[in-house]
Image: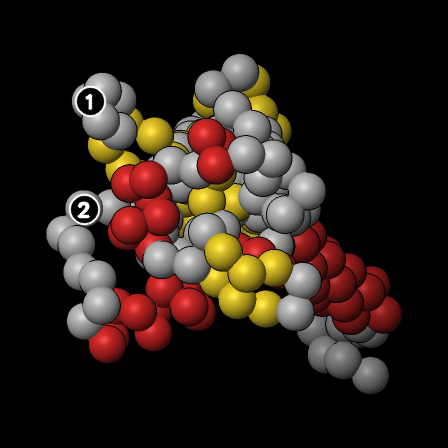
Amino acid sequence: MYFLNFHMYNTAIIFILGITASDSRLWEVIRENGNKELCCFCSRKSLKTKEHIIPECEKKLGTMHFSEYFGPPICSCQASKMYPACPMIENVCGHNITCPNRKVYETCPTNALLQNTMMTCNESLKWTYDIINCNNICTLLNTIENGFVSCMEFGSKAVCNITCKNGFYAAQEKHLPCAEARNSTCLANAKTHNGTLIYVIIFIVICLLMILAAVIFFVAKRKMVRPSPVNGKYS
């Protein structure tokens, strides 16, 4: 990687000075036989003979000069395994994606939770992808209003289930696509509200019946203690 970083810096200087300029891709050359090939790095030890040098790469990128090496930094891809490459592991929206095929210009698929987005190793040896907003991406556990969404991968698809808090429900809770699950809301359970209302009504009715019973009892008791008339008159 030291070679790669040093060489990228050296190449930028060469380009600015106008020593070499090309509209073609930086790490790719067309050989004399018409084959496309990547420019690869090699150390002094691996550069055994001049035959390993790719003339097209040497012409395009020049030479390198540092304490341990001076000369063409390019050798045949058959003689070197030091390909210009992106990192093997890339963190995308909280997901660690492993890319065994990571040479420059190669692509790497993500997982189903990231909607199988394709990543590309660009000329700066960095992964690029089309995900703009990580908030729209599902993780294994996602919070929504009055509940949460748990997601898992099934092959090339992501399946999510919604779990609502007590007293809340979702229109559909099982086997949802990521985007639909993330945009769902747990609503107040109408059955719970209806049940509570019934209990309140029953309580009010019972209270009214108790008051009515008390009134009837009070009136009846007054009638029982009222004195009887003597000769048509009350004593």
The disc label shown at residue 24, or none: 2
In the rendered view of the protein, which quadrant contains the N terminus? bottom right
The residue lying furthest to the left in this view is: 23
Residue that mark 1 sits on: 34
Q: Is residue 179 above or below residue 136?
A: above
Given the image, on which type of amino acid does mark 2 rest? Answer: Ser
The residue lying furthest to the bottom in this view is: 235
- Asked where in the image residue 154 lies, by quadrant, the reply is top right
- Residue toward you, 110 or 54: 54
- Residue toward you, 135 or 122: 122
| Residue 202 seen in this snapshot | no
Give the colouring mode of the picture: secondary structure
Given the image, on which type of amino acid does mark 1 rest? Answer: Gly
Q: Is residue 8 above or below residue 158?
A: below
| Residue 128 seen in this snapshot | yes
Q: Is residue 224 above or below residue 101?
A: below
Identify the residue at image location x=60%, y=35%.
48
